Amino acid sequence: MSTDPLLDLVLNQVEGAGFELVDVRRTGTPARPILGIRADRPDSTPGHGITTEECARLSRAIEAALEAAALVGPRYVLEVSSPGVERPVRFPEHWRRYVGRRVTLHVARMPGRPVAEIVAVPTDDTVTLRLPTGEDATIRLADIRSATLVYDWPAPQAKKKHR
């Protein structure tokens, strides 16, 4: 468990429903907070993830738990969705799962949004990445503002001409 009661509540609801928590984002204003939840089936593959109906059911369960615990005000917005194929990589277990894959990064004190390969996850607090320069760097997960998997889209098929 974390030290964040809101994260713990959401994690319990998502896992209790048989799904995996991919990401939690808090945005909006104090008067109108927005809570964005991304969930998926454990070990899903593109096209075989959480459905719209399952997102709706999960949203209702999270909403009931949030209101019972009074962790958000009365004017909050709850958004529950699939992570998509270029999914966020946030928690240590996700970094471990995707070793060898490429991610687009937004890191404190690193210019731009480089694409790097996940090399290793030495601790729950750090990840080793192969940067575009070819060098490896170990970065604290707390310094990574966002990271998303790079999905290699299939090349479009050439259209055949009919005679």
Image (tube, rainbow, N blue to C red):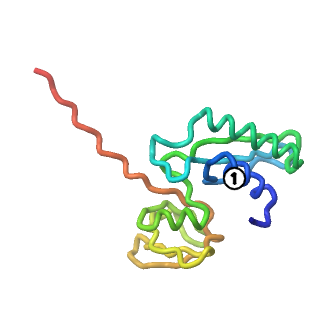
Q: Quadrant of residue 111?
A: bottom right
Q: Is residue 110 above or below residue 32?
A: below
Residue named by callout 1: 25
Q: Quadrant of the N terminus?
A: bottom right
Q: Is residue 68 left or right of residue 83?
A: right
- What is the three-letter code of the residue carrying label 1? Arg
Along the line of sight, the residue nearer the viewer: 70 or 106:
70
Q: Quadrant of the C terminus?
A: top left
Q: Residue at x 67, y 47 (%)?
A: 37
Along the line of sight, the residue nearer the viewer: 59 or 139:
59
Along the line of sight, the residue nearer the viewer: 41 or 89:
41
Could you say where residue 57 lies in the image, as x and y percent from the top left?
68, 36
Q: Is residue 155 left or right of residue 138?
A: left
Could you say where residue 20 lies in the image, as x and y percent from the top left?
61, 52
Q: Residue at x 59, y 67 (%)?
A: 92
Q: Is residue 45 above or below residue 56?
A: below
Q: Residue at x 42, y 52 (%)?
A: 151
Could you say where residue 85 lies in the image, as x and y percent from the top left?
48, 47
Packing grade of label 1 (10 A; few <14, some 14-19, many >=20) is few
Q: Is residue 153 left or right of residue 2?
A: left
Residue occupying the far left of the picture:
163
Q: How many marks?
A: 1
Residue occupying the far top of the picture:
163
Q: Is residue 91 above or below residue 85?
A: below
Q: Residue at x 75, y 45 (%)?
A: 34
Could you say where residue 48 lies in the image, as x and y percent from the top left?
47, 41
SS category of the residue bearing label 1: strand
